[in-house]
Image: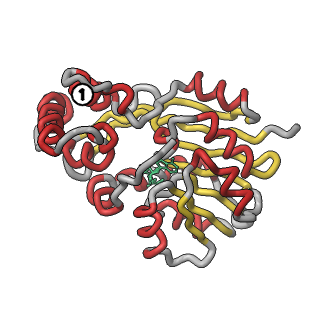
C-alpha cells in the first residue's frame, strides 16, 4: 500500500520525460477507439492521458500522488478528461463511491510496479472493467533497472538497514504476472518482457532522486548523499557512455488481458 506522496512533478518532468515519450508502443497496443471510456491507472502528470483524450470519448486519470494530479489538472486542455487522486490498491472503493461508469479498458504505463500488492491492483482493474473489457499495461518486470536496484539495496544493507524491505518496487516475471491475471478473472492475450536500453534526460543521480525516495526514508540527508554518491560511482563504468550521457537497462512487462466473461 502506498503511504506518503514523495512524488515531484517538477523532478519527473526534468529527469524522466522519457517515460511518457516511450509510452507510444503500449498506446499502440491499446488501440483506443473513438467511442471508448478509458481509465489511465497511475497517470502521473497526464502526458499520455492527454493522448488518450485525443483518441477516445472519455478518460479518467487516477494517481496516488496529489502533486502529479495537480500538475495534470493545471495543464489539462481536454474537456473529456477527469483526474482524481486514488491509490490504485483501492480502485473498487473509489469506483463504487464515486458512481463511475464501467470502463472499456484500463491503460497503465510505468505505474504498476509501484503497487506492491498486485492481486489487489488486479482485482481492482477487474472490478472497474465492463465484461470483456481489456487491461493494457506496461510496467517494470523482472530485472528492470536491475543493477541500480541491487546497488541501492546493497548500499543500505551494508549500513544495517533492510534494503530489500525498503525497495518500493514489484518487478514480476511474465510467468508470475500472467498466472496472477489468470487466477483473478482475466484471459491473458500477451504478457512478455521486453528489455529496453534507455537514455536518461539527465544523469543517474537525477534518476535516483526522482524514483529512489523510498530507499532513503529512514536516513539523514548526509547518509542519503553518501549512498547516492556510492551508487553513482558503482554504476558509472557501465552506465555512462563515452560522451558523458547516461543510460539505464529497463525491462518492460507488456500485457494485454481481457476480463473473463462468466
Ligand atoms: C513513472 S510514473 C508514470 C506516470 C505516467 N503513467 C507516465 O507514463 O508518465 C509512476 C506513477 O505511478 C504513480 N503511483 C505510484 N504508486 C501508486 C499507487 N499506489 N496508486 C496509483 N498510482 C501510483 C506515481 O504517483 C506516479 O505518478
- Residue 71, horizontal then vertical, whole percent: 41, 69
7 up-or-down from 89: above or below:
below
- Residue 211, horizontal then vertical, whole percent: 33, 45
| Viewer-proximal residue among 160 and 176 | 160
| Viewer-proximal residue among 217 and 41 | 217
Q: Which residue appears at 72% of the width and 32% of the height?
A: 184
Is 75 on the left-hand or right-hand side of 88? left
Asked if residue 240 shows in the view, the reply is no
Q: Which residue appears at 40% of the width and 54% of the height?
A: 5
Q: Residues within 10 Å of mark 1 (few under 14, many from 20)?
A: many
Tally of numbered discs: 1
Q: Secondary structure at mark 1?
A: helix
In the picture, the quarter occupied by the C terminus is top right
The residue at the far right in this view is: 262
135 up-or-down from 31: above or below:
above
- Residue 81, horizontal then vertical, whole percent: 59, 70
Please name the colour scheme applied to the rendered image. secondary structure
- Residue 118, horizontal then vertical, whole percent: 58, 35
- Is the residue at mark 1 in contact range of ligand 1, meaning its CB lies under 8 Å from it? no
| Viewer-proximal residue among 34 and 59 | 59
Name the quadrant containing residue 104: bottom right
| Viewer-proximal residue among 190 and 60 | 60
**Which residue corresponds to mark 1?**
156
Q: Which residue appears at 79% of the width and 52% of the height?
A: 130
Q: Which residue appears at 25% of the width and 52% of the height?
A: 201
86 up-or-down from 72: above or below:
above
204 up-or-down from 82: above or below:
above
Asked if residue 178 shows in the view, the reply is yes
Amino acid at each position: 500500500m502506498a503511504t506518503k506522496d514523495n512524488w515531484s512533478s517538477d523532478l519527473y518532468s526534468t529527469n524522466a520525460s522519457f517515460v511518457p515519450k516511450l509510452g507510444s508502443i503500449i498506446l499502440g497496443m491499446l488501440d483506443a477507439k473513438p467511442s471508448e471510456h478509458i481509465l489511465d491507472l497511475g497517470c502521473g502528470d497526464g502526458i499520455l492521458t492527454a493522448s488518450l483524450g485525443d483518441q477516445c470519448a472519455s478518460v479518467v486519470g487516477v494517481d496516488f500522488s496529489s502533486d502529479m494530479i495537480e500538475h495534470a489538472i493545471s495543464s489539462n486542455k481536454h474537456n473529456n478528461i477527469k483526474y482524481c487522486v486514488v491509490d490504485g490498491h483501492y480502485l473498487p472503493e473509489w469506483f463504487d463511491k464515486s458512481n463511475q461508469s464501467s470502463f472499456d479498458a484500463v491503460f497503465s504505463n510505468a505505474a504498476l510496479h509501484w503497487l506492491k500488492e498486485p492481486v489487489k491492483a488486479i482485482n481492482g482493474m477487474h472490478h472497474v472493467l465492463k465484461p470483456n473489457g481489456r487491461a493494457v499495461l506496461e510496467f517494470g518486470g523482472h530485472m528492470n533497472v536491475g543493477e541500480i536496484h541491487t546497488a541501492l539495496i546493497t548500499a543500505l544493507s551494508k549500513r544495517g538497514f533492510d534494503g530489500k524491505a525498503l525497495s518500493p518496487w514489484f518487478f514480476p516475471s511474465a510467468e508470475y504476472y500472467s498466472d496472477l491475471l489468470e487466477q483473478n478473472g482475466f484471459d491473458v492475450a500477451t504478457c512478455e518482457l521486453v528489455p529496453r536500453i534507455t537514455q536518461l534526460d539527465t544523469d543517474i543521480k537525477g534518476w535516483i532522486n526522482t524514483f529512489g525516495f523510498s530507499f532513503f526514508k529512514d536516513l539523514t540527508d548526509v547518509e542519503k548523499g553518501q549512498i547516492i554518491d556510492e551508487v553513482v560511482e558503482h554504476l558509472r563504468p557501465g552506465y555512462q557512455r563515452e560522451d558523458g550521457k547516461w543510460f539505464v537497462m529497463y525491462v518492460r512487462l507488456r500485457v494485454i488481458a481481457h476480463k473473463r466473461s462468466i
